[in-house]
Image (cartoon, helix red, strand yellow):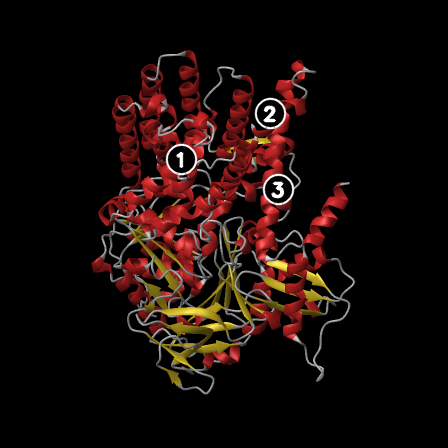
Amino acid sequence: MNELNVILPKSDRTNPATPVLIPGTGNRITWQDLKEKTAYWQEQFGQERKLIALAAERNAESIFAYLAGIESGHVMAMLPPNDAQALKAFERDFAPDISVCFQNGLPEIRQSHSVVPCELHPDLCLLLPTSGSTGVSKVVRLSRQNVESNAQAIIDYLNLTEHDRSALILPLHYSYGLSVLHSHLKAGASLYIPDGSVLEAGFARTVADNQCTNISGVPHSFRLLEETDFRSHEIPSLRFMTVAGGRASPETITQYTHFLRKSGGEFFAMYGQTEATARIAYLPPEDAVHHADTIGQAIPGGTLKLLNEDGREITKAGETGELVYSGPNVMMGYALDRNDLSKGQETDELRTGDLATRDDRGFYKIVGRLKRISKISGLRIGHDSVEAALAGHDIEAIVTGNDSKLSVLHCSSYEDEHVRKLVADITKLPNLAIEVLYNENLPLLASGKVDYEKAKSLFSSARQTSPSSVQQLYSDIFAPKTVKPDDSFVSLGGDSLRFVELSIALEKLLGTLPDKWEEQSITALGNTRAGSKSYLTIGTDLLIRAISILLVVVHHATHWPIPGGAAAMTVLIGLGLARFHWDAVVNGNPGRLLNGIPLVLFPYSLVLMGYTIGYEQFPWASALLVGNLGLVHPLDREMLPFLYWFVELYVQSVLLIYLLLCISSVRDYAKNNSFEFALALIGLGLLLRFGLAETWDFSGRQIFTLPWNFYLVGFGWAICFAKTTRQKLTLLVLGLIAFPAAAYFGGNMTPGWVKYSLQIVVIVALLFLPRAKVHKVVATAVLSVAAAGYHIYLFHRIIPKHFPEWLGKEQFPELFIPLSILIGVLCGFAAWYLQGILLKLAKGSFSFEQLRMKVKTLR
């Protein structure tokens, strides 16, 4: 049999000495080595055309075997590695002539001696599984034209050349992973094959060291990359990244688009199915941010259309229909056994089973599924197949689900966890992607058929009535805003106050606080199972927030020289603004920065109201948020006491940054140079601090003003964007200069040096220890104080200052200070708790009867 060059380029297009495969360990493999290795495997397979089953591992030897078969004209069936059940089922149904699997990294070749009368169709090239590991051998039949055309289309829209190198992190039995191999080899490019997963320590470094220009992954791959803080690394060679194999969240697409754009790279969100040899559509990188909820347009050479229920094409934008794809990469058809392998092309278009709409730009958006199939973590799971497999284990069940979770309703005698584990074994899904519910009887229609809608409603009711629902937490805290399962803390426009409140609630609910939980969807957080660890990892910013507010309370109660708490909280203002609102800002919505102001002003307005009633005079300067500018004096009752300057500073800082980013040229610069813009904010702050604040009198109250403190906000903002070691050290050096200067020129007094020395500790901690491991008891206390911190700040002095006799100042002077501290903290907690109830009442998710029952419980 002659070499066909289905995947491999002709020998005159490659340099024999150039590396083509770079294993994580071992020698690099050149094109000459590849030719010799495939020749060895071709000898093993022989000249006569055969069906070869390959349980392919993600290693060089599997690639040699695969290329030897595909380029010699054999039909290759790619099966999952280390899955004896899947291989056995395939051998039973398809009787392959040769089976290849690996034991401890060494190949094992089994020849079949049975006589198989059925001929293999001359166009047939590749078989790929499509229905998941449910015990049903159903494969997609692909031709040489399918493979070649799809590889060429990918080369075209990704602009692949011989200079590209992919980090191959996807399995080879998976059509998406195989397409990465196909397209790169056909382009004369190379592939780096890491030894471990993307979670391995130093993965980003090895990608950079091996000069990889691209990485392709499924949505789960990017969730794992986030756990390793991948976006904080600099990889100069990285030209693009791609995601497919499931629906990537708009947040993921936006985050990685911005990450890659910083170095001139691109992010491709794609859509495909095995039936189309992997790729069907892609979203052009320039449209990734503004159209992140779409799959974009058809790949080169292909066309997309929508059909209604009557099979007529939908031409009007915005209408929903089944997505249908046509192109040279559409499969020959399905196969259930060896007899089907003699069949030719049975279809020229692919009805995807996905419901979609098309916008005016011509981009398609998936809105649902036509059939009972879930596609989770790149695996397509047929609900009927799972039901049949469970029945084989004497478990009667109804299976429903979506593209994030499989839902199994059963009426067996088995425990839910046993059923969950069995479904995980059947589908190869993680436990977290499976929800199981017991019901005494499975719901049926009058006709005796299964009532799937009723089954879905049982799951919905179970989720909604559960007091521990993550979505309910979000609904309560973001009330009266409507919250959806796909929302995340960031997409909802969360702020620092809600962040700490949700942190404590999630810690109680989940038993752990997942890394970067604020970027995860509510659905993903709901999949996190409760933990029982004695130690928890929490954000250092929450620890600093709790300590800072306690420092403020103690400082005000004792007047000891321990200032610095308010300054640390000012740093956290900048960190919170950048952390929670940056994506919206760079997408042209700087108004999101203002989201936190109403939540800040609501309890503040209660203080204003109480002050007005108590002194019978309206503090207009504080109401206008200019009391810190020295226009009036607190003794005149036209402003609140000095301690409320922090609220005014917060609002003024937010407004200043908002106004700056409303300028399109400034916003564009910030978008493309996020760290440099952060340094510019610090520079502006320092100019105000050592210029305006030193020359303008402010009636002797400079320390409470925006010019005096804005550079601290700038430092917090910059910490959010200091990703590399060089950037972090730059920021630290800047702090080591600015803070001593502020202490010296601020009066050269001991309290000033204490205050600014503390800020150096704060930025070091935030830069180099963003998360801290603490005992669960300590974590609970820290999160509680951090959540109620703002309310503690507002209300901690009201009783000690205005009603000292209540604390026995005259009768028990030695107890007055500790009681002042304790009562101040408790007043803040009470105000925080009551505000939560008011917000729930505003949404209607809380009733006065519930309040009565809570009070009764407390009694």
| Front tag of 3 and 2 | 2
Q: Is residue 597 left or right of residue 697?
A: right
Give the amino acid type for the residue marked by disc 3 in the picture: Tyr
Can residue 641 be spotted in the picture? yes
Residue at 55 percent across and 25 percent down: it is 553
Front residue of 350/56: it is 350
Q: Residue furthest front?
A: 616
Residue at 54 percent across and 30 percent down: it is 546
Element assignment for label 1: helix
- Residue at mark 2: 800
- Residue at mark 3: 833
Front residue of 457/22: it is 457
**Residue 23 location (% of width, % of height):** 39, 46
| Front tag of 2 and 1 | 1
Front residue of 71/237: it is 237
* Label whose residue precedes the other's in the sequence (3 or 2): 2
Against 581, residue 413 (above or below) is below
Element assignment for label 2: helix
- Marks 3 and 1, how far apart at CA: 28 Å
**Residue 105 location (% of width, % of height):** 50, 49
| Front tag of 3 and 1 | 1
Residue at 73 percent across and 44 percent down: it is 855
Against 674, residue 215 (above or below) is below
Front residue of 578/636: it is 636
The dot on residue 621 is: 1
Give the amino acid type for the residue marked by disc 2 in the picture: Pro
* Label whose residue precedes the other's in the sequence (2 or 1): 1
